[in-house]
Image: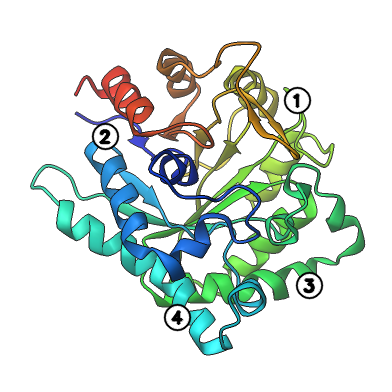
Amino acid sequence: MPGPLILDGGLATDLEAHGAKLQGDPLWSARLLHTAPQAIRDAHYRFLLSGADVITTATYQASIPGFISHLEVSAERARELLMSGVHLAKETVKRFESGKRRPLVAGSVGPYGAFLHDGSEYTGAYAEQMSVEELKVWHRPQIDCLAAAGVDLIAFETIPSIKEAEAVVELLREFPNSKAWLSFSCKDEKRISDGSLFADAVRVAERSTQLLAVGVNCCPPDVVESLLDSAGPLHVSNMSWVVYPNSGEEWDTERGWQTSGKPSGWTPDLSHMWVKQGAALIGGCCRIGPAHIAELRQQLKGR
């Protein structure tokens, strides 16, 4: 049965559920590439068992400068670690692979703000002080490592600003054999995190012939429909929406995810509207685990 590809959920969420201590770590789940690679394999496998068609590497907060600084490794070892994110995911797919489906591996590339480790991937404030060229220089080694490791596609995730979107769209042209999706962090039902209109951000994505999808991630589920509507129909025939919100709970930079108060807004039945709007890649982000992804697959594929 065709239909949208099911993405995985929050890798760090599942790793923490199985004992990893990631809160406050400047490398987040990427540290485990160095300290506990089997834990990453196991998390990937749980998402595959839950029905994910695409698993995302543990490289969102990975960078060569970050590994050198926080792990005290050489530049060469840092590059190997970044590439290992792809190798671990591909090994897990190979172990899982069944005749019915061959899952894909998406190489996660977080925004520059993820390296800063100050929550600025949800504001994009740093982009005001940086040029497009400087942002390209920052992202180039990560993309180079992921592409060299043979990733199936690149996932530019939680991008908070138009300027950083312009940078990764331009940079992608340097890797002509790579396909990607570009997904934004958003502040409300019409705007991405830096205050720009989501519609304008989508127009930046539409300049690329290598982007398969554009959309949103790590936003509350209840704003997705309005965000997609605000951008109007996509103008590029081979481009689709990608949608993977968080649980709808609120993040506190001091205390982490706040589960009290309003219940989780993440329900798999919302995904039917996203499919109607043209979403071809649907999954979850923070606080969404394998059980949620299994429910999502059941809703959309009936199996």
Residue identifier under label 4:
80
Image x and y of residue 226, in percent: 65, 19
The quadrant in which the C terminus is found is top left
Type of the residue with mark 3: Glu
**What is the distance, in whole Å, between disc 1 and disc 4 at their CAs?**
38 Å
| CB contact under 8 Å: marks 3 and 2 | no
Residue 210 visible, this orientation: no
Image x and y of residue 58, in percent: 46, 57
Task: Label 3, secondary structure: give it.
Answer: helix
Image x and y of residue 202, in percent: 67, 41
Residue identifier under label 1:
188
Task: Label 1, secondary structure: give it.
Answer: loop
Task: Label 2, secondary structure: give it.
Answer: loop
The colour scheme is: rainbow
* Residue visible at 17% across and 51% down in the picture: 96
Earlier-in-chain disc, 3 versus 2: 2
Earlier-in-chain disc, 4 versus 2: 2
* Residue visible at 75% across and 47% down in the picture: 119
Taking the image as shown, residue 290 lies to the left or right of residue 154, namely left
Residue 271 visible, this orientation: yes
Earlier-in-chain disc, 1 versus 2: 2
**What is the distance, in whole Å, between disc 3 and disc 2 at their CAs?**
40 Å
Instruction: State the residue in front, 196 or 129.
Output: 129
* Residue visible at 49% across and 46% down in the picture: 12
Type of the residue with mark 1: Asp
Type of the residue with mark 2: Ser
Type of the residue with mark 4: Glu
Mark 2 Cα shell of 10 Å, populated few (<14), some (14-19), many (≥20): many
Quadrant in the picture for residue 6? top left
* Residue visible at 52% across and 76% down in the picture: 144
Image x and y of residue 138, in percent: 70, 72
**What is the distance, in whole Å, between disc 4 and disc 2 at their CAs?**
29 Å
